[in-house]
Structure formats: C-alpha cells, structure tokens
Amino acid sequence: MKRKRSARNRRARRCLFLILLALLALLLIWPRTVHLEGLVSPYAILVDADSGEAVAEKEADVSIYPASMTKVMTALLALEANPDLEQPVTLPEDIFPELRAEGASVAGFRPGETATVRDLLYGALLPSGAECCEALAREVSGSEEAFVELMNQKAAELAMRSTHFCNPTGLHDPEHVSTVRDMARLLRAAMQNETFRAILSAGRYAVPATDLHPEGFTMTSTFWAELGDVSLRRGQFLGGKTGYTSAAGLCLASAAQVKGKRYILVTAGAKGNHGTEPYHIEDAVRVYRQLTR
C-alpha cells in the first residue's frame, strides 16, 4: 500500500513539475503588454513585422505630416525601378536653389555631379539627402510630378488609405499627409527588400570618387548617430528613418528584433527639433525595451 502511495506521489510531483515548466515557458514567450501612454510622441504604433498586426497603438489613424519618413517610399520605388545599382545618375542643377531655400537636409552632392543609384539611395536614407531623392525621382519617372503619381499609386497598393504624397522628400506641404499606421505599412513593405534592409542598417557609407568629389566622401546615418551606444537586452535595432519639420515635429520609423521577433515602430509629432533631446529616439528605446522584459 505504501509503495502504491509513493508511486502516486512521484507521479503527482512529476506532473506538477511539468506543469510548472510549461508555465515558465509560457511566461517566456507570452507577449508583454506595451504601454505607449508615457511617450513624448503623441502618435505611435508598434507592429509585428511578420504578421502586420498592431501590438500597441496611440492615435494611429490621426493625420500627421510624415516629414522625411517619406524618403522610405522614394527609396523603395527607386529600388523597384532600378535593379542596376551601379547605373550613373547626374544630379540636376535646377533642384538645388529650391532645396537651399527650403533649408532641406542634403547628403553633400553638388549640382551636376554624377553618382550611382546606390550612392543616391544611401544618401537618401542615411543623412536624409533631399537632393538624392529629387535626382532619383527624375531618374525613375522623368519628373517630380510623375514620380509623385507613382508614390500615390504605391500607397494605394499598400492600403495606405490616409496617405497623400506631394513630393519625394517630405518637405512640408499641407496636403502631404499620412498616419503612423500607414507609415508602418510602408516600412514593413520596404523591409522585405534585401537591399533596402542593408542600406537602413548601415551606420555610414563611403561614396567612391566622382567627377566633383575626386577623393569621394563619407555619409553617416542620422538615426544611428542619434541612437549612439544604446543597446537592447535580448534584441537589436535593425535601422530607422528619422524625420523633422517644424510642422511635423520629430518623427521616426524604425525596426528592431527582440527575442527573435521583428517589430516596426512609427512615432510622430514629438515636440522638439534638431537642437533638443532626440525625443523620437528616446521613445523608440522606451517602447522596444518593454518587449525585452
């Protein structure tokens, strides 16, 4: 009788151990609740990059100005239209006066300089070079107007229903609008392109010698520079595209991998500017670190 009770006790203990082991495994993989209420950015969405489902969101469908996050669309369309990244492109001289007047960010190319599509893509995504976007737009479609039509067609294909583009750079226009949900759809689509992922993940890029830069020059990523040495426990940033205008505030479309899962985070409208703390970067770190716990 005692032997039977002992065997039953052993089976019960083994069963209890297996239940506790299963609960521990469940706790390790169970998705954490992510809170966005404490962010500086008034608009935010965190998306599972594999499924496209929103993990957390805050005012995700409110209209925003996407600022330089727009350049994700410009780069994606240029990649889809130009499989030959070594194709030479001459930067039109007539684009520079207006960009200077608007105070647009530039990568460092000069009027009439000839670079490759690869150089211009890195210039558009790393230092947010507006001259690169304008040159790519004309290379793809012949004119900015025709390229903008292509941008809006692609937005419709991606179900970006609240988005309307007016230019390839994100310079302010009251009709150049989107939402963080739409921009998350865009970045998720772009991250499926291997070349786009490689460019966005780069901290710097050395432009080879050109006709007007015989020694070449180096461009650095605004995102990685502002992120600095910040890291994620059990995760890593995969890249990001910052944005800012006085009307848009500080914006960021970023991607990260945490505990083996990939995420897209888009925030917009943070009060601040290039001279303040990088609130958009700080918000991203705050959100992704919630997933690491």
Image (cartoon, helix red, strand yellow):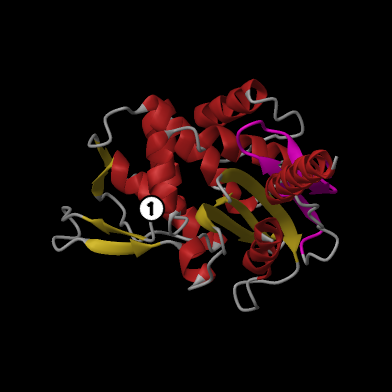
Image check: 8 left or right of 166? right
Q: Residue at x 70, y 72 (%)?
A: 272
Residue closer to the observer: 68 or 58: 58
**Image spot of residue 98 (x, y percent):** 50, 54
Kind of residue at disc 1: Gly
Q: Is residue 139 visible?
A: yes
The answer to whether residue 229 is above or below residue 127 is: below
**Image spot of residue 171 (x, y percent):** 60, 52
The answer to whether residue 92 is above or below residue 221 is: above
Q: Residue at x 51, y 30 (%)?
A: 147
Task: Reply yes or no: does residue 287 show up in magenta.
Answer: no
Q: Which residues are magenta?
A: 41-65
Question: At numbered mark 1, what does the secondary structure look like: helix, strand or loop?
Answer: helix
Residue count near mark 1 (Cα–Cα under 10 Å), binned few <14, some 14–19, many ≥20 = many
Residue closer to the observer: 150 or 36: 36
Q: Which residue is mark 1?
A: 123
* Quadrant hosting residue 263: top right
Quadrant in which the C terminus appears: bottom right
Image check: 68 left or right of 125? right
Quadrant in which the N terminus appears: top right
Q: Residue at x 63, y 52 (%)?
A: 67
Q: Is residue 94 visible?
A: no
